Image: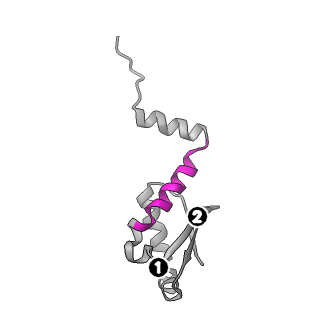
Amino acid sequence: MKRNDAQSIGQLIRTYLRQESLESPLNERRLVNAWPEVVGPAIASYTDGLFVRNQTLFVHLTSSALRQELMMGRDLLVRNLNKHVGAQVITNIVFR
């Protein structure tokens, strides 16, 4: 007997994560982990203490010159990070 209402495992997991309100924290963790891939190893070496709060990514930088450079490309970084994760996780980045 074949079932017509069969769903893929991936779809079942996504549904479960949404029901349990675990999708947002998971996407936030993915975004923080994607930071070195998106910005590259050189920039990632000057950053630490990344965290997401209220759809804002907070990044601690050890170089003030790099902070100015990244502030100018903030919108592009937001788009690239969200695209890498595959969801609208952040709307802003704050560099400290």
Q: Residues within 10 Å of mark 2 (few under 14, many from 20)?
A: some
- Quadrant location of the N terminus in the rendered image: top left
Name the mark nearer the viewer: 2 or 1: 2
Q: Where is residue 42 in the image (x, y as percent from the top left)?
A: 39, 77
Residue 35: x percent and y percent?
45, 66
Placement of 12 over or under 46, stated as above or below: above
Q: Is residue 34 magenta?
A: yes
* Outermost top residue: 1
Question: Tag on residue 73?
Answer: 1
The mark found on residue 49 in the picture is none
Which secondary structure lies at badge 2? Answer: strand
Q: Residues under labels 2 and 1: Cα distance?
A: 19 Å
The residue closer to the viewer here, 18 or 25, is: 25
* Disc assigned to residue 51: 2
Q: Coloured how?
A: one colour
The picture quadrant where one finds residue 90 is bottom right
Q: Position of residue 15 (x, y in %)?
A: 52, 36
Amino acid type at circle 2 is Phe
The answer to if 31 sits in the magenta stretch is yes
Report the span colored magenta: 21-36
User: What residue appears at the point 43 percent right and 61 percent down from the top-left corner?
Assistant: 34
Q: Residues within 10 Å of mark 1 (few under 14, many from 20)?
A: few
**Residue drawn at x 46%, y 71% as measured from the top left:** 77
Residue type highlighted by circle 1: Gly
- Choose between 21 and 45: the one closer to the eye: 45
Q: Quadrant of residue 4?
A: top left
